[in-house]
Amino acid sequence: MARSVLERLVEAGLVQAQGIKKGRTYTLSPQVYRELGQSADYVRQAGFDSIQQEQMVNNYVKNHGKITRQETMDLCRIGKDQATRLLRRLIDGNKLKLVGQGRGAYYEFP
């Protein structure tokens, strides 16, 4: 029941959904923050997600030595494409390097 209410709020533009399935989270939309005169609060809220995801991946690699795309998906509760973009961003920033190809590929510190 709650999920259907949240989905109706998404359709009405009052709430934004992020993630997939059980990991899906909801935040107020930018329009709501604008109406409340708190636009900066939305940027703060939305901006932390990618930073937190990068930190979670870095902490995982620090503790386990490496991470796969599937582990990134599970850890951050994001889809395949989002995990690929996150890992690509970390590679481009020289924070991780890709080792291997295909199913055996993983990411570790350079």
Image (tube, grey):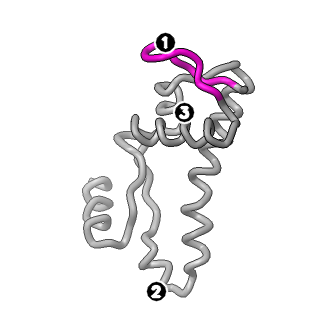
**Where does the image place residue 68, in percent across and percent down from the top left?**
53, 23
What residue do we see at 57% from left, 53% from top? 49
Instruction: Classify mark 2: helix, strand or loop.
Output: helix
> Are the two marked residues, 3 and 1, in contact with CB atoms closer than 8 angstroms?
no
**Where does the image place residue 17, in percent across and percent down from the top left?**
38, 57
According to the picture, the residue beneath numbered tag 3 turns out to be 75
Report which quarter residue 38 is drawn in: bottom right
**Where does the image place residue 40, in percent across and percent down from the top left?**
61, 76
Q: CA distance from mark 3 to mark 2?
A: 34 Å
What residue do we see at 47% from left, 25% from top? 70
Instruction: Classify mark 3: helix, strand or loop.
Output: helix
Q: CA distance from mark 1 to mark 2?
A: 49 Å
Q: CA distance from mark 3 to mark 1?
A: 18 Å
Disc number for residue 104: 1
Range covered by the magenta-colored residues = 97-108
N-term-proximal mark, 3 vs 1: 3
What residue do we see at 70% from left, 36% from top? 95
- Decide which of 104, 56 is in the foreground and name it: 104
Residue count near mark 3 (Cα–Cα under 10 Å), binned few <14, some 14–19, many ≥20: some
Q: Quarter holding the C terminus?
A: top right
> Are the two marked residues, 3 and 2, in contact with CB atoms closer than 8 angstroms?
no
Magenta stretch contains residue 56: no
N-term-proximal mark, 3 vs 2: 2
**Where does the image place residue 97, in percent across and percent down from the top left?**
64, 27
- Decide which of 22, 38 is in the foreground and name it: 38
